[in-house]
Amino acid sequence: MILDFNKMPTLTWANFRGGEKDTVVRMYKDTDNRIMFMKLEPGASIGYHRHEDCSEIMYILQGVASAVYDGVEEELQAGMCGYCPKGHSHGMANKGEEDLVFFSVVSEHGSSGGAQEERSRGQNADEEKKGDTL
């Protein structure tokens, strides 16, 4: 299966998870995974949050991220991968001068909430925020 992020609608989430500015995302979503191409402009962030029923892998394509994992700050650069297993917390900020571009996969772990419907395209940002465990 090929996922062409260039053909997916762009969603903009303001202050995602309590972060600063906008998170821009193109996303494929099914019952088990959310596979996302994401961008944070300089000064933007994804707020610190806990993964109760899922895990997340973030692969940095461009820029430098200041990531906090279980309260410890780390730096991620292009070519590096951040991982937040189920039961742990993290957040990420773009403190650089260029866009932070990264690929993220959120995998569900048998939860009854989260991604229960197969939905990959055409949703607005408000729909995507409801029930997301990102």
Image (tube, rainbow, N blue to C red):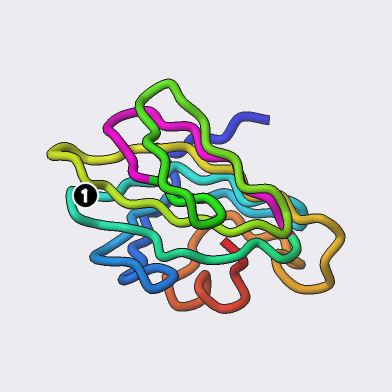
Which of 82 and 111 lies nearest the eye of the viewer?
82
The residue shown at (21%, 49%) is 41
Give, as a single range, the part of the protein colored magenta. Answer: 54-66
Which of 2 and 132 lies nearest the eye of the viewer?
132
The residue shown at (29%, 40%) is 100
Q: Position of residue 76 (x, y in %)?
A: 39, 33
Q: Residues within 10 Å of mark 1 (few under 14, many from 20)?
A: many
Q: Position of residue 55 (x, y in %)?
A: 68, 50
The residue furthest top is 79
Horizontal side of residue 49 vs 43, given as left or right: right
The residue furthest front is 72
Q: Quadrant of the C terminus?
A: bottom right
Number of numbered discs on residues: 1
Considering only vertical position in the picture, is 17 above or below 102? below
Q: Amino acid at mark 1?
A: Glu
Q: Is residue 58 magenta?
A: yes
Residue under label 1, please give it.
Answer: 41
Which of 93 and 115 lies nearest the eye of the viewer?
93
**SS state under label 1:** loop
The residue furthest left is 97
